[in-house]
Amino acid sequence: MLRALVRWKMYLGVIVEAVARAAPGARAYLTGGAAEGRLTALSDVDVVVVLPREPTFEEAVELRAKIHEEMDKLGVPLNLPVELHIVGPESAKRYRVLIPLAHSSGEA
């Protein structure tokens, strides 16, 4: 796991592509320790996926699974600790740091 975590930046573009495939129109942001430059051996890579509206719990669980499926298809190592936070615009405001990764609509 540590070896994959050290190379986490290599996989950001692939994670964004997985989000684009599973949730067109969503916006992906980096948050947490990776965004704040304080990753440790016990860290995960936190990615906030902001949908156009607040998802239900069931929708968030389903979308998280779809994104992980796409990540697997695209070659993201299963041992890369990625935590997906599936939220709407209002819930996204609770995150202290949000670094834009890309937009699923194909914008950079």
Image (cartoon, rainbow, N blue to C red):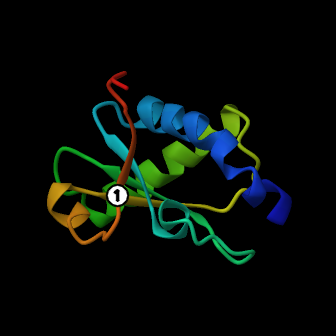
- The spot of residue 72 in percent (x, y) is 68, 41
Location of the C terminus by quadrant is top left
* Rendered view: 54 above or below 69: below
Quarter location, residue 97: bottom left
Position of residue 46 measured from the top left corner of the image (x, y, whole percent): 50, 62
Number of numbered tags placed on the structure image: 1
Q: Position of residue 3 (x, y in %)?
A: 85, 58
**Is residue 1 at all visible to an observer of this figure?**
no
Q: Quadrant of residue 31?
A: bottom left
Q: Indicate the quadrant containing the N terminus: top left, top right, bottom left or bottom right.
A: bottom right
SS category of the residue bearing label 1 = loop
In this view, which residue lies farthest toward the right? 3
Identify the residue at image location x=53%, y=70%: 33
Q: Is residue 90 left or right of residue 42?
A: left
Q: Is residue 54 left or right of residue 79?
A: left
Q: At 60% across and 34% down in the image, what residue appears?
A: 14
Is 57 left or right of 35, judged from the image as shown?
left
Q: Position of residue 77 (x, y in %)?
A: 76, 47
Q: Disc 1 marks which residue?
A: 98
Task: From the viewer's side, name the closer residue of 22 and 3.
Answer: 3
Residue located at (24% from left, 62% from top): 92
Question: Which kind of residue does numbered mark 1 sit on?
Answer: Leu
Res. 73 visible in picture: yes
Q: Residue at x 20, y 65 (%)?
A: 93
Instruction: State whether residue 44 is above or below residue 72.
Output: below
Quarter of the view holding residue 37:
bottom right
- Rate crowding at label 1 as few (under 14), some (14 to 19) or many (20 or more) other CA atoms within 10 Å: some
Q: Residue furthest front?
A: 37
